C-alpha cells in the first residue's frame, strides 16, 4: 500500500486551514467569516483523512458544516450588515488580549517542541478498512463497549441542550 | 522533505486554537465569537485524532464526543443570542453589561 499521507498534502491542507482561519477572524462581514470557517473545517477533515480517521472526517463534514450553515442563516437574519462597516470591529481590550494570546502561544508551542522527544516513536497501525466498525465496537460492543455509558450521557446532554435552546428562544416562558 | 510526524499535527492544532482564541478575545460581534469557539473545538479534535494515531482508536471516540458537545454548545449559544438580541437589539459583545455595575 503506497502512502497517501505525503508531506505535500499535509502542508497544503494545514496552510489552507490556518489561512482561512485567519481570514475568518479578520473579516468584517460575518457571512464571509462563515464561508472561511467552512473552508477551514473542510481542510481539517482532509487532515483527518490523512490520519486514517475516515469516520471522523465524515462527521466533521456533516456535523460541523451543517451546524455552520445553520449559523450562517442566523447571521443573515440577525445582523445588519451595513452598520458593521461603520462601527468598530475590535473591542477595547484587544491589545491586552493579543498579549495574553502571545504568552499562551509561547507556552503551548514551547511545551510541544520541548516535549516532542517524549512522544512514542512507533505508530499504531490503525485498521483503515473497518474504521467505522471498530469505533462502533468501542461504543456499543458487548465486551469492548467501554464508552456506552458516556454515549448515553451525551444523548442526555443533547436533549437538555435542545430543550434549553427552545426555552431561551421562546418569546414568553 | 522530511517525514510528517505527530508533532506537526499537534502544532497545526495549537495554531488553530490560538487563532480561535484571538477571535474570541478581540472581536465584538457575537456571531464571529461563536465561530471562533467552533474553530477552537475543532482544533482540539485534531489533537485527539493525531494522538489516536499513537495510542489506538480511543482518541477518535473522544473526538466524537467533543463533536456532540460542539453541537449542544452551538444550540444553546444561539438560543442565548436570540434572547439577547430580542432584549437589546444588538449583537455586540461589549454591550452585554447587565451584570456590571
Image (spheres, grey):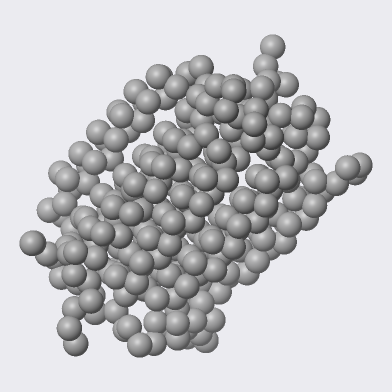
Does A57 sit above or below residue B9?
below
In x, y percent, where is residue A10?
Answer: 24, 62
Question: Within the image, what quadrant is residue A41 found in?
Answer: bottom left
The image shows a total of numbered marks equal to 0
Which corner quadrant of the image does residue B54 belong to?
Answer: bottom left
Nearest the viewer among A103 and A117 is A103
Residue reaching furthest top?
Answer: B101
Q: Position of residue A121 (x, y in %)?
A: 14, 65
Looking at the rendered image, the quarter that the C terminus of chain A falls into is top right
Name which residue lies at 21% across and 55% down.
Answer: B7
| Residue A144 visible, this orientation | no
Question: Does residue A46 appear to the left or right of A3 in the view shown?
Answer: right
Residue A3 coordinates in the image, percent (x, y):
19, 78
Question: Which residue ends up furthest to the left in the rendered image?
Answer: B1
Q: Is residue A64 visible?
A: yes
- In which quadrant will I find the N terminus of chain A? bottom left
The foreground one among B77 and A140 is: B77
Residue nearest the observer in this picture, B27 or A73: A73
Q: Residue at x 38, y 41 (%)?
A: A22
Q: Is residue B60 left or right of residue B74?
A: left
Q: Residue furthest front?
A: A82
Task: Judge whether B45 appears above or below A83 on screen.
Answer: below
Q: Is residue B97 left or right of residue A166?
A: left
- What residue lies at 23% left-to-right and 76% top-to-bottom? A4
**Residue at 28% over, 40% down:** A108
What percent of the width, then of the height, locates residue B100? 67, 16
Amino acid at each position: 500500500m503506497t502512502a497517501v499521507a505525503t508531506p505535500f498534502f499535509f502542508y497544503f491542507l494545514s496552510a489552507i486551514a490556518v489561512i482561512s482561519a485567519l481570514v475568518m477572524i479578520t473579516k468584517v462581514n460575518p457571512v464571509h467569516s462563515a464561508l472561511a470557517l467552512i473552508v477551514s473545517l473542510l481542510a481539517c477533515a482532509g487532515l483527518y483523512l490523512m490520519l486514517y480517521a475516515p469516520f471522523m472526517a465524515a462527521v466533521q463534514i456533516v456535523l460541523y458544516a451543517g451546524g455552520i450553515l445553520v449559523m450562517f442563516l442566523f447571521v443573515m437574519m440577525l445582523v445588519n450588515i451595513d452598520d458593521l462597516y461603520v462601527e468598530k470591529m475590535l473591542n477595547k481590550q484587544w491589545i491586552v488580549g493579543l498579549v495574553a494570546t502571545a504568552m499562551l502561544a509561547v507556552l503551548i508551542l514551547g511545551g510541544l517542541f520541548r516535549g516532542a522527544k517524549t512522544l512514542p516513536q512507533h505508530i499504531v497501525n490503525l485498521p483503515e478498512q473497518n474504521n467505522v466498525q471498530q469505533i462502533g465496537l468501542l461504543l456499543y460492543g458487548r465486551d469492548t463497549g467501554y464508552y456506552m455509558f458516556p454515549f448515553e450521557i451525551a444523548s442526555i446532554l443533547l436533549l437538555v441542550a435542545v430543550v434549553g435552546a427552545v426555552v431561551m428562544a421562546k418569546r414568553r416562558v | 522533505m522530511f517525514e510528517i510526524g505527530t508533532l506537526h499535527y499537534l502544532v497545526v492544532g495549537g495554531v488553530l486554537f490560538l487563532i480561535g482564541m484571538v477571535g474570541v478575545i478581540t472581536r465584538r460581534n457575537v456571531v464571529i465569537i461563536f465561530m471562533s469557539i467552533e474553530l477552537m473545538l475543532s482544533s482540539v479534535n485534531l489533537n485527539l485524532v493525531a494522538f489516536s494515531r499513537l495510542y489506538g482508536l480511543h482518541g477518535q471516540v473522544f473526538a466524537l464526543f467533543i463533536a456532540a458537545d460542539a453541537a449542544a454548545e452551538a444550540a444553546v449559544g444561539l438560543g442565548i443570542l436570540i434572547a439577547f438580541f430580542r432584549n437589546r437589539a444588538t449583537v455586540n459583545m461589549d454591550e452585554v453589561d447587565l451584570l456590571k455595575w
